[in-house]
């Protein structure tokens, strides 16, 4: 890291919290990352100095807010390597981005007898919207399986792609297993059959450099709150040619050109997909989060987390009865595990009493739990501000509570 870990941690006021008399050890970053002061300041600044509705007013505040909102769109375009700002749509988050495509692309392309391919390690947000779209059209969901290690079985993919397949929807990184999926390879395989690909990037963008043109995908979705930004804002990247052909997702303000009772004509991209007043302050704060990530350095982020991941795995392996779920060779800093026969919820509750925040349960990936025949896992996930000392605190706490749960 170019700056010391202490200096970096000082940018995150919440990390000074104490929990039941213990310093907070925040290891639930896959659920949401904490926010640096610069992001909190950006939100505060918007509401204290700039609050106004965008794209509508001629007054000073409205034009300043519009300018800054559109500047963040350009910032996001650069961040993920999109060709044009027409391809960057602000949403409420990954879930809404996927629902937008499932609903709009679904109405445009999906017919009875068609198929959508997802993987068995998807988050529910990349399963249920497709089930809804399939139900409406009379289409079927098909599933790419994964191995015991937690690696997608790409050998099974060719047999799932046929003349009925309308889209492949796959996660870049599994929020439960940490597996980094070969999304460029999957995209190339699907494109051989002329099938578009949606990538759920919710767990990827905060951990590695993402270039949508390098991946080649047609849609890429992510959430601001998992990348040091605020809740309530996310992004849908869509290839312009495809977005141009898709019908609007929601009707309302901003997405129209002309409305009469006989007929409505729709606005140009990207506004056609941004009906109603967007979360302007959150978009501006997302811009501050991108600044934070780029100033820290995406390589630095990735290297630091990889260091924590390897150290944690090495130490956790020595705890009696601890089983790591998801051992893919290429993974991000997400570790799911079980401690003996203890229920994950009990482990999480006892860790919490020691100040350690982890997530427990099925992590909105019930098909993964079914695959392993388990009710859930304990999940520790790291971010740039986590330290080796915090990994040690987790390991020490697990060693302390293991006999209580045996
Ligand atoms: N995963 C987790 O603790 P939203 O809620 O829209 O910001 O993100 C949904 C989502 C979609 N895809 C993946 C891969 C995700 O991990 C998530 C959110 C959180 O793992 C909450 S369940």
Image (spheres, rainbow, N blue to C red):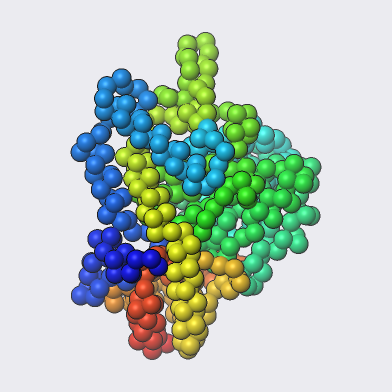
Q: Is residue 372 visible?
A: no
Q: Quadrant of the N terminus?
A: bottom left
The image shows residue 346 at horizontal and vertical percentages of: 38, 75
Residue lying at 70% horizontally and 63% vertically, measured from the top left: 153
Pinpoint residue 135: horizontal percent, then vertical percent: 62, 41
Residue drawn at point x = 76 percent, y = 62 percent: 155
Left/right placement of residue 192 relative to residue 242 reads right
The residue that appears at 64% across and 55% down in the rendered structure is 183
Above-or-below relation of 247 to 158: above
Q: Position of residue 5 (x, y in %)?
A: 33, 69
Q: Is residue 71 left or right of residue 170?
A: left
Q: Residue furthest front?
A: 2
Q: Is residue 392 left or right of residue 182?
A: left
Q: Nearer the viewer, residue 164 or 329?
A: 329
* Count of marks, rendered view: 0
Q: Is residue 167 visible?
A: yes
Reply above or below: 288 against 175: above
Q: Residue at x 55, y 45 (%)?
A: 81
Q: Position of residue 344 (x, y in %)?
A: 43, 73
Q: Is residue 256 above or below residue 392?
A: above
Q: Quadrant of the C terminus?
A: bottom left
Answer above or below: position of 247 versus 167: above
- Is 15 or 366 nearer to us in this picture? 15
């Amino acid at each position: 890291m170019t700056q010391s870990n202490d200096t970096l941690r000082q940018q995150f006021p919440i990390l000074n919290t104490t929990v039941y008399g213990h310093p907070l050890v925040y290891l639930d970053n896959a659920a949401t990352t904490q926010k640096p002061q610069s992001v909190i300041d950006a939100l505060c600044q918007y509401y204290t100095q700039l609050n106004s509705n965008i794209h509508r007013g001629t007054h000073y505040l409205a034009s300043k807010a519009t300018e800054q909102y559109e500047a963040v769109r350009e910032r996001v375009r650069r961040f993920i390597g999109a060709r044009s700002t027409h391809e960057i749509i602000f949403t409420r988050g990954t879930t809404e981005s996927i629902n937008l495509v499932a609903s709009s692309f679904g109405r445009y392309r999906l017919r009875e007898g068609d198929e959508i391919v997802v993987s068995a390690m998807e988050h529910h947000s990349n399963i249920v919207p497709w089930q809804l779209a399939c139900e409406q059209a009379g289409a079927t969901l098909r599933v790419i399986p994964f191995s015991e290690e937690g690696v997608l079985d790409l050998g099974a993919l060719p047999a799932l792609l046929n003349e009925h397949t309308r889209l492949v929807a796959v996660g870049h990184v599994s929020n439960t297993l940490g597996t980094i999926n070969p999304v460029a390879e999957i995209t190339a395989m699907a494109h051989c059959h002329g099938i578009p690909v949606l990538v759920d990037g919710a767990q990827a963008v905060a951990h590695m450099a993402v270039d949508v043109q390098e991946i080649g995908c047609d849609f890429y979705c992510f959430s601001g709150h998992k990348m040091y930004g605020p809740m309530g804002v996310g992004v849908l990247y869509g290839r312009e040619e495809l977005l141009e052909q898709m019908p609007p997702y929601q009707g309302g303000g901003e997405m129209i050109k002309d409305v009469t009772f006989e007929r409505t004509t729709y606005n140009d991209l990207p506004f056609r997909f941004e009906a109603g007043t967007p979360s302007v302050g959150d978009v501006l704060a997302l811009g501050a989060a991108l600044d934070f990530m780029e100033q820290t350095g995406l390589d630095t982020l990735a290297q630091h987390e990889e260091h924590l991941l390897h150290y944690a795995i090495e130490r956790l392996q020595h705890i009696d009865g601890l089983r790591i779920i998801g051992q893919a060779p290429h993974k991000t800093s997400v570790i799911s595990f079980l401690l003996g026969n203890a229920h994950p919820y009990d482990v999480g509750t006892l860790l919490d009493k020691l100040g350690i925040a982890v997530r427990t349960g099925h992590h909105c990936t019930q098909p993964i739990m079914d695959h392993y025949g388990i009710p859930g896992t304990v999940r520790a996930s790291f971010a740039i501000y986590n330290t080796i000392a915090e990994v040690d605190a987790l390991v020490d706490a697990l060693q302390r509570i293991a006999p209580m749960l045996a």
